[in-house]
Image (cartoon, helix red, strand yellow):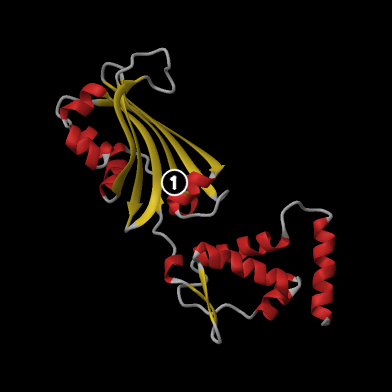
Amino acid sequence: MANTEISGVAAEAAERRTSLIPRYVSIADRLRQRITSGAWRAGTLLPSLHKLAEEFDVARPTARQAVQLLVKEGLLSSQRGQGTFVTQAATPIKTTPLETSLYELAQTYKSLSPKILEIDETPRTLPIAPDGPADYIYMRRLHSLDGRPYCVIALYIAQDIFNSKPAQFRSLAVIPLLLQHKSLIVQEAKQTLSISAADAETADLLGIPTSAPLANMTRVFRSDDGRIVYYAEVSYRGDAIRLEIDLKP
């Protein structure tokens, strides 16, 4: 066994005693970051397994496991006799800023393509007001940006608002429709951001690894009479969102 592999095996043994995360998973995470950040673009030839093993101080079988994990995810493609390449599907998704105005939010959603995953037109109560009136229509949707999964939304719309344009609310982005509604004035709109890890179902819908970061947004819109007309729980893939904040001096 080569000295590089001996030192790599020793390093792995030491790491196993201090970490519950398999070494190949950690390496795959670092390689994935190079791809999603754009450092390794589509068509890039990866370093050989020998060089990867040297870089991360592991044995070549561990480096191979990391590469195979990304091949399984579709980020890499192994071609016999030529090497392993970054696939076209690994092109970083276009990022958008987290909006701070209703107008900006509506403009963003106009560029998204919605797909209904679930719809229930039997009136429900809101999750945040289970003792309130059962007069909300529920939908769960997958939104795509430039043909790629962008976010998953579970949303509730006031029944009377939904019934005013049911075909449009089923097929188009909801927020622009709310702002265009002639008899509705959105007086208050609040959103709360949190970060979590993707569960298996959400990861599959968004085309990201399980436990990849999600930006979760909860939105509550109220009309001028104080009634909640829209409530949504949104899960954005973490690599599609950026937060821009102007700091006060």
Give the image location of residue 224, x and y in percent.
26, 20
Which one is nearer the viewer's eye here, 191 or 174? 174
Q: Which residue is mark 1?
A: 236
Q: Amino acid at mark 1?
A: Tyr
Which one is nearer the viewer's eye here, 240 or 129? 129
Q: Visible in this render: residue 34?
A: no
Secondary structure under tag 1 reads: strand
For image coordinates 21% across by 22% down, the residue present is: 160
Looking at the image, is 183 positioned above or below residue 193? above
For image coordinates 28% across by 42% down, the residue present is: 106
Give the image location of residue 70, x and y in percent.
56, 65
Q: Quick check: 45 left or right of 23? A: left
Which one is nearer the viewer's eye here, 104 or 25? 25
- The residue at the far bottom in this view is 81
Quadrant where the N terminus lies? Answer: bottom right
Query: Quadrant of the rendered structure where residue 16 is?
Result: bottom right
Looking at the image, is 52 positioned above or below residue 105? below
Give the image location of residue 228, x and y in percent.
33, 21
For image coordinates 41% across by 60% down, the residue present is: 93
Looking at the image, is 211 positioned above or below residue 223? below
Q: Quick check: 53 left or right of 93? A: right
Q: Mark 1 packing: few (<14 Cα in 10 Å), some, or many (20+)?
A: many
For image coordinates 82% across by 53% down, the residue present is: 18
Give the image location of residue 86, x and y in percent.
50, 73
